[in-house]
Image (cartoon, rainbow, N blue to C red):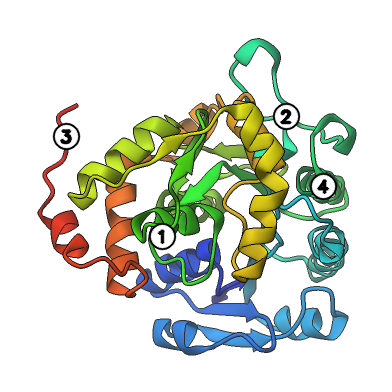
Amino acid sequence: MSELYIVTGANGHLGNSVVRKLREQGKHVRGLILKNDPTTLLENLGCEIIQGDIRDQKTLELLLRSDDSMIVIHTAGIVSIAQKKNHLLYDVNVNGIKKLVDLATQKNVHRFIYISSVHAIPENTDQQIIHEIDHFDPELVVDDYAKSKAIASQYVLDHVKLGLNAIIVHPSGIIGPNDYGKAHMTMMIQEYMNGYLSSRVDGAYDFVDVRDVSHGIINTIDHGKVGECYILSGHRVELKQMFDLLKKLSGKRFSIHVLPFWFAKVSAPLAEIYYRLRKLPPIYTKYSLYTLRSNSYFSHEKASHHLNYRIRDFEETLRDTMIFLSEMKRIKRKKVLLSIKQYKPMKQ
């Protein structure tokens, strides 16, 4: 029997990266995107397209209609760091996946890969290394986004007991090229390179290349164990280190000021209003500031051992992201692209 790979959120940063890798392997891929989303990207990748809504039963019936062996990779979801409540967050991240999981269980899909988040995993105290867990409780995590991921993760695990061949992966902060939308980290780099971002705070987080996550997800299909969870993390990076590297890669000495953390917290609501007026996602909010001071020591040892999961140098990720943004004409400063391509990596 032939295989059909179904990718939800196929136009998204992670979604289109997964589609890209699958098509490079010659796989038959069907992608779900929103009704009004552009189709050019997926058409150029040779992907079958379904336009609809993850919350709509008719859309899901059409998406999972096939006589082939189906592998579902659920990347669709709303990522929100904003303070303002998003009424779609729970509806999409929880109600949407419940409908998809129910149908996938009924259809007896070959594999169901749910893309959760490290935010669904409670923090360890005293900066202890965070590993995978086997039960999720929304009351043990912070913020609505994390709670929605915890609820959805537990729903998936509950359905493994009902016969769903599901595996959960938990990426950390995804970064990298081929983001045709406005993901948080992509916008931060873009804003900085265009001279709009002149301040930062001290802090750190774990960032992972979208291409490494995509590779890990695809390896999960054949090498992951049903009912298991795998953390797909990358490098824990200090913001100072990141911005120093951006300066060197660009060949420009853009000035950036370090804000006192208390001031950043107080001014975060104003920053959200500023970006809302520009119709852009906020660069920093109270929740993003919280994550920069939270425990972000995530272990990907389990994925490395079982999935042959590998991560590339963070410098390569930043460089390729900047090249992508420059080629898409999203970085407007002259000669930046040339500087990036001519840059010689720092010695480790």
Identified by mark 1, the residue type is Gln
Q: Secondary structure at mark 1?
A: helix
Q: Position of residue 6 (x, y in %)?
A: 61, 72
Q: Secondary structure at mark 2?
A: loop
Residue highlighted by disc 1: 190
Q: Choose top left, top right, bottom left or bottom right for residue 257.
A: top left
| Circle number at residue 346 | 3
Identified by mark 4, the residue type is Asp
The span from disc 2 to disc 4 (Cα, nearest Å) is 20 Å
Image marks 3 and 2: residues in contact by CB distance under 8 Å: no
Q: Position of residue 52 (x, y in %)?
A: 73, 85
Q: Secondary structure at mark 3?
A: loop
The span from disc 4 to disc 1 (Cα, nearest Å) is 27 Å
Residue highlighted by disc 4: 144
- Residue 63 vs 343, above or below: the answer is below
Residue highlighted by disc 2: 133
Q: In this rendering, does residue 228 appear at all?
A: no
Point out the tag, 3 or 2, that comes first from the N-terminus: 2
The span from disc 3 to disc 1 (Cα, nearest Å) is 22 Å
Q: Residue at x 71, y 81 (%)?
A: 63
Closer to the observer: label 4 or label 1? 1
Q: Residues within 10 Å of mark 2 (few under 14, many from 20)?
A: few
Closer to the observer: label 2 or label 4? 4
Identified by mark 2, the residue type is Ile
Task: Judge from the rendering whether residue 32 lies leftward or rightward of residue 177; answer left or right.
Answer: right
The span from disc 1 to disc 2 (Cα, nearest Å) is 35 Å
Point out the tag, 1 or 2, that comes first from the N-terminus: 2
